[in-house]
Image (spheres, helix red, strand yellow):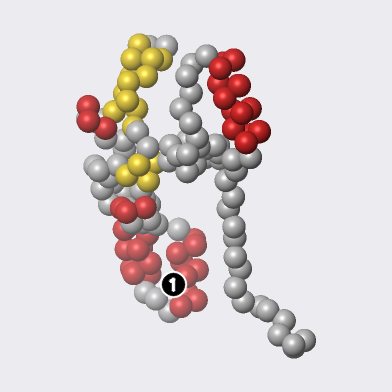
């Protein structure tokens, strides 16, 4: 409350406007998780039996914005929780067979053949063009 009082004093905004803006940010639609429909759920076995979890991607039933910060289009659920890295980020990794020894030989053969994936980052600007 003191924060909004300081804003009202510094910017000559009426105290009522500061209170209204404070109350407007309190209510959000994304705080409470919604029920998961069968079309977007993945069954997972837990301690208490099977439970439904969201898949990755845009959640179609997301309403409003997240604490007044992000619009609905940015409410994206990643495939892996942050900060984990998805090693198959481009979908080009061959599918696993289930046999660890066979998969190890297959990945070793791929590395031996020299198949690689590169990300090339190009930065433009701040070139030193004084020495031509």
Does residue 30 appear in the picture of this structure? Answer: no
Q: How crowded is mark 1: few (under 14 residues within 10 Å), some or many (20 or more)?
A: some
Q: x, y (%) of residue 69?
A: 40, 57
On the picture, is 131 further left or further right than 31? right
- Write down the residue under mark 1: 8
Q: Quadrant of the C terminus?
A: bottom right
What secondary structure is found at the residue carrying circle 1?
A: helix
Q: x, y (%) of residue 53?
A: 34, 27
Q: In this view, does 80 lie above or below 125?
A: above
Q: x, y (%) of residue 78?
A: 43, 41
On the picture, is 68 further left or further right than 4? left
Q: x, y (%) of residue 14?
A: 37, 74
Extreme residue in the front direction = 113
Q: Is residue 74 above or below residue 50?
A: below
Q: Which residue is drawn at 62% across and 36% down?
A: 113
In terms of depth relative to the viewer, which is nearer, 13 or 116?
A: 116
Q: Residue at x 46, y 66 (%)?
A: 5
In terms of depth relative to the viewer, which is nearer, 39 or 125?
A: 125
Q: In which quarter of the image is the N terminus?
A: bottom left
């Amino acid at each position: 409350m003191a924060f909004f009082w300081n804003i009202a004093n510094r910017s000559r905004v009426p105290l009522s406007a500061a209170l209204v803006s404070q109350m407007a940010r309190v209510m959000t639609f994304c705080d409470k998780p919604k029920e998961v429909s069968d079309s977007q759920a993945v069954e997972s076995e837990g301690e208490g039996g099977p439970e439904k979890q969201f898949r990755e991607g845009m959640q179609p039933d997301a309403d409003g914005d997240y604490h007044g910060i992000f619009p609905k289009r940015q409410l994206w659920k990643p495939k892996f929780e942050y900060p984990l890295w998805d090693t198959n980020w481009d979908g080009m990794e061959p599918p696993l067979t289930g046999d660890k020894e066979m998969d190890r030989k297959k990945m070793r053969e791929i590395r031996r053949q020299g198949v690689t994936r590169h990300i090339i980052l190009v930065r433009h600007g701040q070139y030193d063009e004084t020495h031509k």
